[in-house]
Image: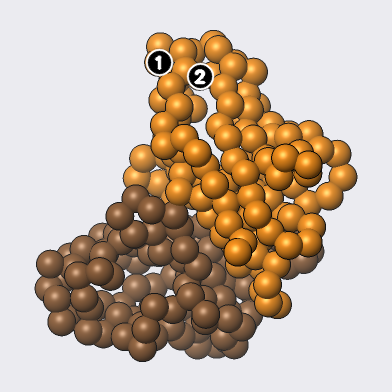
Amino acid sequence: AQSVAQPEDQVNVAEGNPLTVKCTYSVSGNPYLFWYVQYPNRGLQFLLKYITGDNLVKGSYGFEAEFNKSQTSFHLKKPSALVSDSALYFCAVRDTRGATNKLIFGTGTLLAVQP
Amino acid sequence: EAGVTQFPSHSVIEKGQTVTLRCDPISGHDNLYWYRRVMGKEIKFLLHFVKESKQDESGMPNNRFLAERTGGTYSTLKVQPAELEDSGVYFCASSQEPAGGYEQFFGPGTRLTVL
């Protein structure tokens, strides 16, 4: 079955420290991977994607993610967390079954950055 | 450029009533997706339009849900009659594939509460 796992419901980090939000996936074929962020009372906002090419992908707001094919992971990282990064983060993979590009999402990880 | 908009932002209805959600995609985006997040779980795909045609409605829960996209512009999702388990946040997303790079742009969502 095709799926995305975000093993941590919540990640706590102090401002200025590096952060990692974990994501693993299971999909047949080549994965198209995405990270989205949801701020309170807002919609999902696209952060970054991996389609092909360099395994380290850089996105908005200083975030980056590393695609690791052998570990089927796509962890989101940032070298120095800001309080304003506190939000709900979703990892997603394109469903390779069928002809559409529908996304399969994880359950989300709440990032809390303490001042 | 205007983003994806959804109306209403919140809807509270009684079990058995009818509710219609509306989504206006980004202008020029042929692809329109509906997703739903129920009770803090993962975001799940409902259906996908390309212009006015339904490409994939495999995620629609049952025949109480009806989606339309007249003229290939805005889309509506009607729930009739609503049940308690329909409560959740309904997201709409649009994209231009493959030229747009496969990322989907999400609206703010409609929070539906069925009492």
Is B86 rendered above or below residue B72? above
Task: Please tell me which residue is depicted at 28% across the width and 70% down the height of the picture.
Answer: B86
Q: Which chain is orange?
A: A
**Figure quadrant of residue B89:** bottom left
In which quadrant of the rendered image does the C terminus of chain A lie? top left
Is B23 left or right of A63, judged from the image as shown?
Answer: left
- The N terminus of chain A appears in which quarter of the rendering? bottom right
Density class for disc 2 (Cα within 10 Å; few <14, some 14-19, many ≥20) is many
Check the image and report above or below for B20 versus A40. below
Q: Chain of mark 2?
A: A
Q: Position of residue A68 (x, y in %)?
A: 76, 39
SS of the residue under disc 2: loop
Of residues B112 and B59, the one drawn nearer to the viewer in this rendering: B59
| One can see residue A87 in this view | no
Query: How is colour applied across the structure in the image?
Result: by chain
Disc 2 designates what residue?
Answer: A82
Furthest residue toward right: A53
Closer to the chain start, of discs 2 and 1, is 2
Amino acid tagged 2: Leu
In the foreground, B33 or A34? A34
Tell me, by letter, which chain the rendering colours brown.
Answer: B
**To which residue does mark 1 refer?**
A114
Chain to which the residue tagged by mark 1 belongs: A
Q: Position of residue A19 (x, y in %)?
A: 57, 22
Secondary structure type for disc 1: strand
